[in-house]
Image: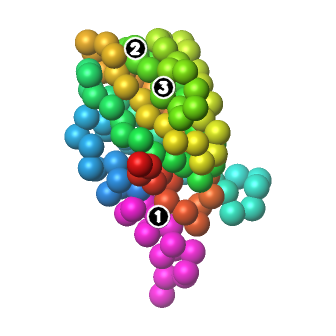
Amino acid sequence: MKSVSTWSAIAVALVAGALFAQNPGIQRTILQRKDISMPGREAVIARVEIAPGAYAGRHTHPGEEISYILEGEGEILVEGQPPLKVKPGDSFIIPSGAKHDAHNTGTVPLKLVGIYLVDKSKPMATPAP
């Protein structure tokens, strides 16, 4: 019999997968997820690819996002802040709960590695209006 925490983890993965599947312009691949020293939190490492001209879609995370740009160019759009232009070698941090989006402004895929330090009892990402 599966424990409540196992079912919760499955539900979180399904909700996050559904959110990410709604936008064909972005592909997120979870590379690893592991509990961290903060109770109830986990680190999720993902490879993210956004097609030329595409947006990730406005969303929030129940924790911080720390990302590093591998290839391409784009803008990170955080509500209340000016657009942050990014290119290979740049990094950025999105505060917990901040409404944000990413836009590929280039002609090649925007590729990045995202590390999410999130509340594992909540969906990794939630659409934002």
Dot 1 amino acid type: Val
Drawn side of residue 47 relative to residue 5, left or right: left
Tell me the number on the disc at residue 12.
Answer: 1
Q: Earlier in the sequence, mark 1 or mark 3?
A: 1
Q: Measuring 39% from the left and 62% from the top, which residue is drawn there?
A: 15
Dot 3 amino acid type: Ile
Q: Residue furthest bottom?
A: 1
Q: Nearer the viewer, mark 1 or mark 2?
A: 2
Element on which disc 2 rests? loop
Tell me where the magenta segment starts and ends, as one range.
Answer: 1-15
Q: Earlier in the sequence, mark 1 or mark 2?
A: 1
Dot 2 amino acid type: Glu
Q: Where residue 111 sits in the image (x, y, percent)?
A: 39, 24
Decide whether residue 5 is among the magenta residues: yes
Q: Which residue is mark 3?
A: 76
Q: Measuring 54% from the left and 49% from the top, which residue is drawn there?
A: 61
Q: Which residue is mark 2?
A: 73
Query: With respect to residue 39, does 99 lie above or below?
Result: above
Q: Nearer the viewer, mark 1 or mark 3?
A: 3
